Image (cartoon, helix red, strand yellow):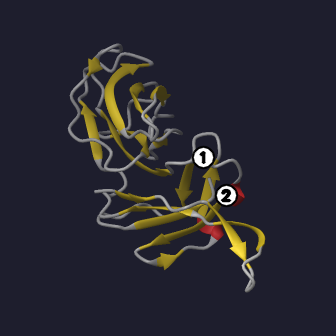
Amino acid sequence: MKMSNKQITIGVNFDENGKARGIVRFPRQVLYYNMNADNSVIKAVAGGVASGTAYTTMTAQNDVPRNVQIEDTVDNRNPLVTLTVVGYDQYGDSQTEVIGPCGATGNTTPVQGSVAFSWIVSITTGGAATAGLGGVSLNCGSKIGVPGPLTASTDLKCVAINQAIQLYSDFTVDTTYDTILLATLVVAADDYQIWWFG
């Protein structure tokens, strides 16, 4: 589930005589509540699927704008496999991202995408044929998309998880894609509140 609440971003500060004393900026905020857990499956691709196979029906969609990640789901034998993801970002603009390859044989760490997807239209396998190999999965990631521009890391003022304020060292700002990466994974039913200037 998601609820947005964009506040006034600019106001005027007055003194006790009613004279304007300068411009005051108020941060905008968004509340993402009852989020899906990190690594929740969006689409599983079975083993034995050839490169170039396209899928247009997803098992699930991102619950809020967030990145996606590719994970080897069976036996870590898909080091060359990529997934091309087509969909829309947090602003409703279309975008395409190639995620992967999965990495060396035996790698159990999911490969993170960079952009936030609010909706996924299709995914297409690539990199190498997967015939005879274990499957891969496209899952939710931990980079959260902010519905407003982040021009500098200082634009992000505060992040609260379940009403607990996080330290600045607990998140990383990506001004290219207007996302924040939390140091901890998203847990099922977590509530996120984000304040930023934008």
Q: Is residue 133 left or right of residue 170?
A: left
Task: Give me the C-alpha separation between circle 1 and circle 2.
Answer: 9 Å
Mark 1 highlights which residue? 149
- At label 2, which amino acid type do we have? Asp
Disc assigned to residue 123: none
Crowd class of label 2 (few under 14; some 14 to 19; many from 20; radius 10 Å): some
- Residue at (45, 19) in percent of width and height: 127
Tell me what residue is drawn at x 31 percent, y 41 percent. 73
Q: What x and y, as percent, mark residue 15?
A: 75, 81
Q: Nearer the N terminus, badge 1 or badge 2? A: 1
Say which element carries label 1. loop
Q: Read off the residue under disc 2.
A: 155
Q: Is residue 183 visible?
A: no
Name the side, left or right, on which 146 lies relative to 137. Answer: right
Which of the 4 image quadrants contains residue 69?
top left
Q: Quadrant of the N terminus?
A: bottom left
Tags 1 and 2 touching, CB below 8 Å: yes
Position of residue 84 measured from the top left corner of the image (x, y, whole percent): 42, 24
